[in-house]
Image (spheres, rainbow, N blue to C red):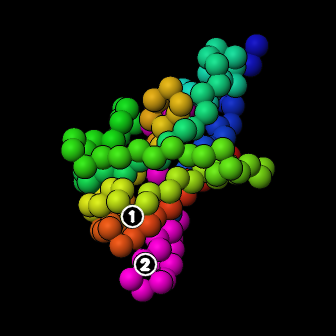
């Protein structure tokens, strides 16, 4: 029997970025990719699905909130209490190219008009996969339409 403590770990990386359109200036702005924290629920979801211990739970929504509380492995939702919104990831906005999965959600002009300090991604059953406090938060207003992109790679 193999001692699992000596097996090499394959890290699961996550990154996110913002793509923002400002209708007043008819201009797009794209942020740099930022690392995120894959939380315990996210790691459990991936590994249990691979092992057949749970049904596969696909990513379904990306959220933004105004909390600046640091992310933790035990997070199971965005921390913001009032200014928090999750938007559905449409089927055409999930793109897989080995070894990367790209997901995106669109926040229209009237959606999430506050400072986007935190971001997160959830599965269809509501489990938070990853969360991060953004080092360059977007102060979203009603003249901006934003696309949040999330990248997972092995």
Q: Quadrant of residue 11?
A: top right
Which sits earlier in the primary sequence, circle 2 or circle 1? 2
In the displayed orientation, state which residue is furthest to the bottom.
Answer: 25
Give SS at disc 1: loop
Above/below status of 32 relative to 126: below
Q: Using the image, tell me which numbered label, if any, was put on residue 31.
A: none
**In front: 122, or 114?**
114
**In front: 120, or 86?**
86
**Alpha-carbon span between mark 2 and mark 1:** 9 Å
Identify which residue is drawn at 42% across, 86% down.
Answer: 25
Q: Decide if residue 56 is in sight here.
A: yes
Horizontal arrangement in the rendering, residue 121 relative to residue 2 (left or right): left
Q: Magenta stretch: residue 135 in it?
A: no
Horizontal and vertical percent for residue 32?
51, 71
Above/below status of 102 relative to 55: below
Q: Magenta stretch: residue 25 in it?
A: yes
Horizontal and vertical percent for residue 22?
42, 77
Identify which residue is drawn at 64% across, 19% down.
Answer: 55
Above/below status of 68 relative to 145: above
Q: Decide if residue 35 is in sight here.
A: no
Q: How busy is the neighbourhood of tag 1: few (under 14 within 10 Å), some, or many (20 plus)?
A: some
Instruction: State the extent of the magenta-drawn residues as a range.
Output: 19-43
Dot 1 corresponds to which residue?
A: 109
- Say whether marks 2 and 1 touch (CB < 8 Å): yes
In the displayed orientation, state which residue is furthest to the left.
Answer: 82
Dot 2 corresponds to which residue?
A: 23
């Amino acid at each position: 029997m193999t001692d699992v403590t000596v097996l090499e770990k394959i890290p699961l990386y996550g990154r996110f970025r913002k793509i923002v359109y400002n209708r007043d200036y008819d201009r797009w702005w794209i942020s740099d990719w930022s690392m995120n924290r894959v939380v315990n629920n996210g790691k459990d979801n991936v590994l249990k699905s691979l092992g057949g211990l749970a049904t596969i739970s696909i990513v379904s929504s990306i959220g933004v909130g105004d909390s600046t509380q640091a992310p933790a492995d035990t997070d199971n939702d965005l921390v913001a209490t009032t200014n928090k919104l999750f938007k559905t990831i449409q089927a055409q906005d999930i793109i897989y190219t080995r070894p990367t999965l790209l997901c995106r959600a669109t926040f229209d002009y009237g959606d999430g008009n506050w400072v986007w300090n935190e971001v997160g991604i959830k599965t269809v059953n509501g489990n938070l996969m990853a969360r991060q406090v953004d080092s360059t938060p977007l102060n979203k207003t009603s003249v901006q339409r934003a696309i949040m992109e999330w990248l997972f790679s092995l």
